[in-house]
């Protein structure tokens, strides 16, 4: 029988992804064209992961606006944001309700600009995010694509920066990438960069819009980039910010898997060396060496261990690659995956590593994953905090990575990318396996 309901979804709301992307632009505030409930849900969700203030405005749909359209509410809301926050940019995302009634957001924004033509109006970046059709991942990419559409200017130039589209990664990952560009002595534009806006220090006075993020001036410079790198295994040209930048400004780009693990990190550094004409800095040669050494050390603990992994398509594919490199056996790999590529890519990966027992669940919710997990059993589960119930059910430890992590602190500081990120994950995984073995043994070993 075909599935008619989703039981405990693995993917989240599309404007939620857009709201996260907009947090990576300096002096930007997000507004949702829809009801207050949508904004509250997304704020609550993102605050629990990042543990930072998260203001998201709303055009506050009521029964009346749902019938007659939300244009007036939108314009009044924009006025309120401008007077209260004085933003440089407003990221405007639609919601299920405004999409369902077919409210023309672009028309309302054009009207708004006309009304304010004599005053300074922030840049308004619109993105269509119908959540009944797409997930948070598509919403995130859609928002970044809209930023390119609105702001990228000029033409590709050999002496220009490298634009990097990192996708949905942690604040620590973004800081790692910035450090990489600095060590390559290459200027860059990161879109988006929420490494400070979503993990700031303490303030003497409350900041309505937290400092940090990529500036509008930097975003305009995307157009004159020497090249661009986009992290994704599944994004289509139609969804891709890098493809749009290429069409608009002639910037060549490389699309590679998120650099989690050894081979994915190798691809990233190789692309960067080629794009910048710079040899690999010693720092990363040493980092790579330490990772390979550590993989050797961990192998006896990890080889053949049965693992369940789930999450966003891009992240799950990249992390699976690393788990297989490290000798683990993936028994279940699940994603709510909307791209239609997940099963094919995971099958190729599993074949490459002779992982024959794998059960790839495409379009899966937690109900599907739980059913399969009870049958398969596992030594370890890796994914977001949403897998805790599953972890209890099959008595296997859960390693929290990716997004969201709602039941632990430090989600922003989990490093996944590059050789350093792989080392971090490797230690985490290996020590969890060792701890499990140690605590279940009645002997009390102190050497493991
Ligand atoms: S799924 Fe739709 S209605 Fe629900 S919070 Fe998201 S945008 Fe709002």
Image: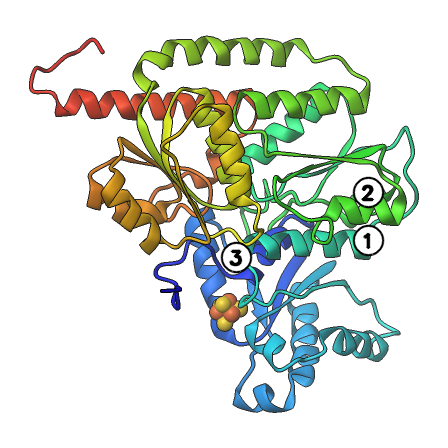
Quarter-of-image position of residue 75 = bottom right
Q: Nearer the viewer, residue 321 or 129?
A: 321
**Vertical relation: 73 (above or below) 409:** below
Q: Residues within 10 Å of mark 1 (few under 14, many from 20)?
A: some
The yes-or-no answer for disc 3 within 8 Å of ligand 1 is: no
Q: Position of residue 284 (x, y in %)?
A: 62, 14
Marks 1 and 3, how far apart in space?
Answer: 24 Å
Looking at this view, name the residue that lies furthest to the front.
Answer: 1
Disc on the earlier residue, 3 or 2: 3
Residue assigned mark 3: 54
**Residue hosting label 2:** 222
> Is 28 positioned to the left or the right of 55 in the image?
right
Q: Quick check: 272 left or right of 113?
A: left
Residue contact at pointers 1 and 3, CB within 8 angstroms: no
Image spot of residue 115 (x, y percent): 83, 80
Closer to the camera in the image, 412 or 202 = 412
Depicted 106 relative to depicted 405: above or below = below
Q: Which residue lies at the image location 26% right of the left edge and 39% below the top edge?
A: 376
Comes first in the chain, label 1 or label 3: 3
Q: How far across and down, in percent of the image, does residue 107 sit? A: 78, 77
- For numbered disc 2, what is the local secondary structure? helix
Residue occupying the point 52% across, 57% down? 54
Real-space Cα separation, disc 2 to disc 1, in angstroms? 8 Å
Q: Quadrant of residue 329?
A: top left
Assign a secondary structure to mark 3. loop
Q: What label sits on residue 151 in the rendered view?
A: 1
Badge 1 marks a residue whose secondary structure is helix
State yes or no: discs 2 and 1 in contact (Cβ < 8 Å). yes
Residue 377 visible in the picture: yes
**x, y (%) of residue 2?**
40, 64
């Amino acid at each position: 029988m075909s599935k008619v309901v989703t039981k405990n979804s693995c993917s989240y709301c599309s404007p939620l992804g857009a709201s996260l992307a907009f947090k990576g632009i300096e002096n930007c505030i997000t507004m949702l064209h829809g009801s207050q409930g949508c904004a509250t849900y997304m704020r609550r969700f993102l605050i629990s992961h990042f543990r930072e203030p998260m203001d998201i405005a709303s055009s506050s749909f009521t029964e009346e606006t749902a019938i007659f359209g939300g244009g007036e509410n939108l314009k009044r809301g924009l006025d309120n944001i401008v007077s209260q926050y004085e933003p440089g940019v407003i990221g405007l995302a639609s919601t299920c309700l405004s999409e369902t009634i077919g409210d023309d957001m672009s028309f309302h924004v054009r009207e708004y600009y006309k009304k304010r033509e004599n005053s300074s109006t922030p840049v308004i970046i619109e993105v269509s995010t119908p959540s009944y059709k797409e997930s948070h991942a598509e919403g995130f990419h859609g928002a970044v694509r809209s930023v390119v559409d609105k702001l990228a200017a000029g033409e590709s130039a050999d002496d220009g920066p490298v634009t990097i589209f990192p996708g949905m990664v942690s604040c620590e990952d973004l800081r790692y990438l910035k450090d990489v560009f600095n060590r390559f002595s290459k200027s860059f534009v990161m879109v988006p960069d929420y490494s400070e806006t979503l993990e700031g220090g303490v303030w003497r006075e409350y900041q309505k819009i937290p400092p940090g993020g990529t500036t509008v001036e930097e975003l305009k410079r995307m157009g004159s980039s020497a090249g661009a790198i986009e992290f994704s295994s599944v994004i289509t040209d139609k969804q891709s910010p890098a493809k749009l930048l290429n069409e608009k400004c002639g910037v060549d780009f490389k699309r590679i898997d998120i650099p989690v693990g050894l081979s994915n990190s190798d691809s990233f550094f190789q692309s960067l060396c080629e794009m910048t004409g710079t040899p690999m800095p010693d720092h990363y040669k040493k980092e790579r060496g330490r990772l390979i050494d550590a993989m050797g050390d961990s192998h006896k603990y990890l080889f053949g261990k049965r693992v369940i992994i789930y999450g966003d398509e891009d992240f799950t594919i990249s992390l699976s690659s690393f788990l297989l490199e490290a000798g683990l056996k993936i028994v279940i790999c699940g994603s709510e995956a909307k791209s239609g590529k997940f099963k094919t890519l995971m099958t190729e990966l599993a074949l490459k590593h002779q992982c024959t027992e794998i059960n790839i669940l495409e379009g899966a919710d937690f109900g599907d994953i739980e059913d399969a997990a009870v049958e398969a059993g596992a030594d370890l589960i890796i994914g977001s905090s949403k897998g805790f119930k599953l972890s209890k059910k099959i008595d296997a430890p859960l390693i929290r990575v990716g997004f969201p992590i709602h039941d632990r602190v430090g989600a922003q500081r989990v490093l996944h990318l590059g050789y350093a990120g792989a080392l971090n994950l490797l230690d985490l995984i290996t020590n969890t396996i060792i701890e499990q073995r140690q605590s279940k043994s009645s002997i009390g070993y102190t050497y493991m």
